[in-house]
Every structure is written in structure tokens, then in C-alpha cells.
Image (tube, grey):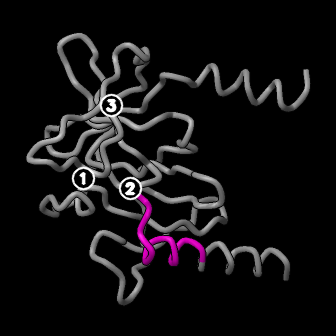
Amino acid sequence: MSELDFNKASEDTLHGKYLTFFLDQECYGMEISFITDIIQMQPIATLPEVKSYVKGIINLRGEIIPVMDVRLRFGKPEIDYNERTCVIVARTGALCVGLIVDSVSEVIMIPDEGISQPPKINGSSNRFIKSIGKVGQEIKLLLDFEKLVADDEFENVARTEAAHQEAANDA
């Protein structure tokens, strides 16, 4: 089996699988293909002069990762972190980020026919919601991970930390 065949087979086994998590009482989901780790909260080194939802950076097994509080990114009120608060580590291309969420629920399978586009309300749509997943009588708000982390300031923090990491590895 070639590497291309292996990657395609791996993508096929991940298709339709979502990690679900909570913010407030609302259940969100994100494609499992982006997820690399789920970790407990750990000390976060704060950075000066960044947006409030960028909480800082963490050191995960030698890799420096910027961390975003998804609750704050969505404009929800800040709460104290507790034993259920988690960091979902996700990657898209070279960008690796930690997403702080209230709690992680489970990995679920949502078939293509269970997914629909989010409704437009008053001519606008939530830019972070990619689609709506229907699971029985429940709905899951499925996030567009790439749009969630698409922020010039946040990407600059991530790229700066990645460059520092590469320089340290080369030294």
C-alpha cells in the first residue's frame, strides 16, 4: 500500500467523525481529522498585547502552542476553569493551536445525510459554524476550525512560536 493509499484510507475512516464538546450548555463539534490531543488544563504563559481570547502559550512535549479560549472567541462571558475544562489541540497545515473548552463529550459519527447548512438569520450567518449535525433529536453545531483560528493576530502568535521552535531545534 502506497503512502497516498494509506492517507486516503485514513481519511475515509475519519470521515463523518466529530469530537463534541460543550461551551455553556451548547454542544459543538469539530472534525476529528483536525484533533491531535485532548489534554487537561495546564499552566499558560501569558503574552502581552494580544486579544483577550488568546490566553497565551503552552509547552506540550516540547512544542510551543498558542492557546485560545473558545468561549471568549464566541463572545461568551469568561468563567473560572475547573477540573472538566480541557484543551483540544488541533492542527491545520503548519498551524497548531490549543482550544480551551468547558468540557469534552465524545466522538460521534454523523452521516452526510445528517448534516445540513446553518440557517441564515436576518441575512447573516455565524462565520464559525460550518454546518449543523442532527443526531437523533439533538443538534450539534459543527465548527469550521480553519475560520475559528483565522485571525491575523492569532496566526502571527502561532507562526512566531513555530519559528522560534524551529530555530531552537536547529541550534
Query: Callout 3: 10 Å neighbours few (<14), some, many (20+)?
Result: few
Query: Callout 2: 10 Å neighbours few (<14), some, many (20+)?
Result: some
Identify which amino acid the numbered label 2 is placed on.
Leu
Q: Secondary structure at mark 2?
A: helix
Farthest residue toward the front? 123
Query: Callout 1: 10 Å neighbours few (<14), some, many (20+)?
Result: few
Q: Main secondary structure of the magenta part?
A: helix
Identify which amino acid the numbered label 1 is placed on.
Asn
39, 22: nearer the viewer: 22
First of labels 2, 3 by sequence position: 3
- Residue at 30% across / 31% down in the picture? 117
**Distance in Å between CA atoms under marks 3 and 1:** 15 Å
| Mark in front: 3 vs 1 | 3
- Residue at 34% across / 22% down in the picture? 115
Q: Which residue is mark 1?
A: 82
Query: Which label number is shown at residue 56?
Result: none
Residue 96, image x, y percentages: 57, 59
Q: Is 100 on the left or on the right of 64, as rendered? A: left
> Is 156 one of the magenta-colored residues?
yes
Q: From the viewer's perspective, is residue 94 above or below residue 92?
A: below
**Distance in Å between CA atoms under marks 2 and 3:** 20 Å
Identify which amino acid the numbered label 3 is placed on.
Ser
Q: Which residues are magenta?
A: 149-159
First of labels 3, 1 by sequence position: 1
Q: Is 148 on the left or on the right of 25, as rendered? A: right
Q: Which residue is mark 2?
A: 148
Q: Which residue is mark 3?
A: 105
**Distance in Å between CA atoms under marks 2 and 1:** 23 Å
42, 24: nearer the viewer: 24
